[in-house]
Image: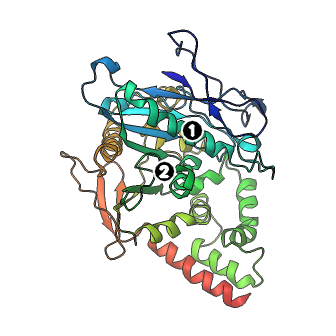
């Protein structure tokens, strides 16, 4: 069901709740337009400023739901400049079969959503305020759809996952769903990444020229990733090349470097949250299957036969027609879909992703006993931190760079 959340008629102002519609029945059969954005494939500006809507999905009509169900609110990714919450982008076919209510929230993007004009009426981050208004709407109205306003979990992918963290830190969100943050109440968290996130650097056909261009940019990449304007000593970059590349860099070696450079903040967050008093469940998604849409469709490289790129986990939580076009549903993909949906919805219901019938207990990670769940064709709980050897290298390199500045 599509529901109007807010309207904005003045550029770059905070959203306000939409007026009630005059008729008794609201036609929610037509999807809204995505928020204004530049479409990378068509190279056109698409979408509408009238885009602040959310979608509510329920396993059954509210009248037949006897006890309130856990609610999962999803924020889409796209670097805060693209993406949508449309039913065609994130349909609920999988998740609602696990007895939860799913809500997907649209928010303004790019300059319309995040430009700070430095004025009293606009101090930026309108896109996050859009999300917050969506969460407030859920608190106020979700019970009418069979949802439990006291059991709301927010989750997201890429920029959407960052949004979850921002709301946990924001004083504006503090008094809203208990899964955001609540005074003196431990809040369980699931955090993870895909083992080949850095494949995001490759788009389309990977030619020798593309590889050479990526290799040539390594020095500036290292400086950027280490939050330095420049690295004065070439020894620092030489350390990186020696660690990652045996000889001439390969696609996968460059992907590993990009994984660590662009997603290194994950490891810093990992170290921080595992010192807290609340349960932290860490995962690494490494499954390579027929539905790994980014790897298979955007990279177009038949030599890749393992690992998961950025966003490759999404087709195992959300049924999307183009993800599965021409592919039969079979093992091990069905097992991965069931495992992912079971763990994500069980976490929403209970705060613990492990459920009866799973062949592996997903234990929370702590500073004394770090561990993570490897999600592949089967599930394995592994001791230690994700990619610990590579992260130890970067921690040591940061000290080297500081000494050589």
Which residue is pictured at 50% across the width and 9% down the height?
24
249 lies left or right of 295: right
* Quarter that holds the C terminus: bottom right
Which residue is pictured at 55% across the width and 55% down the height?
171
Q: Residue furthest bottom?
A: 403
Decide which of 359, 155 is in the foreground and name it: 155
In terms of image quadrants, where is residue 30? top right
The answer to whether residue 214 is above or below residue 390 is above
Which residue is pictured at 56% across the width and 42% down the height?
132
Which residue is pictured at 60% across the width and 42% down the height?
300
Q: Is residue 140 something that shows in the picture?
A: yes
Question: Contact, CB < 8 Å: mark 2 with mark 1?
Answer: no
Q: How is the image coloured?
A: rainbow
* Helix, strand or loop for disc 1: helix
Residue position marked by numbered label 2 in the rendering: 308
Q: Mark 2, mark 1: which one is toward the viewer?
A: 1
Disc assigned to residue 133: 1
């Amino acid at each position: 069901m599509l529901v109007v959340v807010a309207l904005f008629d003045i550029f770059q102002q905070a959203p306000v709740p939409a007026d009630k519609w005059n008729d008794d029945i609201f036609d929610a059969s037509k999807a809204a337009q995505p928020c204004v954005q530049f479409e990378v494939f068509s190279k056109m500006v698409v979408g509408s400023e009238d885009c602040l809507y959310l979608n509510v999905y329920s396993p059954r009509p509210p009248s037949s739901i006897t006890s309130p169900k856990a609610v999962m609110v999803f924020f889409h990714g796209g670097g805060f400049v693209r993406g949508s919450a449309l039913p065609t982008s994130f349909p609920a076919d999988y998740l609602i079969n696990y007895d939860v209510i799913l809500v997907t929230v649209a928010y303004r993007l790019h300059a319309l959503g995040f430009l700070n004009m430095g004025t009293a009426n606009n101090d930026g981050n309108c896109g996050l305020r859009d999300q917050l208004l969506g969460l407030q709407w859920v608190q106020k109205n979700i019970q009418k759809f069979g949802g439990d306003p006291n059991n709301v979990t927010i989750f997201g992918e890429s920029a959407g996952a960052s949004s979850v963290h921002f709301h946990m830190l924001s004083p504006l969100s503090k008094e809203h769903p208990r899964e955001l943050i609540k005074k003196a109440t431990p809040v369980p968290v699931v955090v993870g990444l895909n083992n080949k996130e850095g494949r995001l650097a490759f788009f389309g056909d990977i030619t020798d020229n593309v590889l050479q261009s990526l290799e040539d940019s390594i020095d500036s990449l290292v400086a950027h990733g280490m939050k330095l304007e420049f690295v004065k000593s070439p020894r620092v970059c030489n350390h990186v090349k020696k660690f990652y590349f045996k000889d001439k860099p390969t696609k996968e070696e460059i992907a590993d470097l990009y994984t660590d450079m662009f997603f290194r903040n994950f490891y810093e967050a990992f170290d921080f949250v595992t010192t807290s008093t609340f349960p932290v469940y860490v995962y690494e998604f490494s499954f390579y299957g027929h539905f790994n849409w980014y790897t298979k469709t955007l990279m177009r490289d038949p030599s890749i036969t393992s690992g998961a790129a950025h966003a490759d986990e999404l087709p195992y939580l959300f049924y999307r027609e183009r993800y599965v076009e021409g592919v039969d549903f079979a093992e091990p993909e069905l097992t991965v879909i069931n495992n992912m949906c079971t763990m994500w919805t069980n976490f929403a219901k209970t705060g613990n992703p492990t459920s009866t019938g799973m062949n592996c207990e997903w234990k929370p990670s702590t500073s004394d006993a770090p561990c993570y769940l490897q999600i592949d064709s089967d599930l394995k709980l592994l001791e230690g931190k994700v990619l610990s050897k590579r992260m130890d290298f970067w921690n040591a390199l940061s000290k080297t760079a500081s000494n050589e500045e």
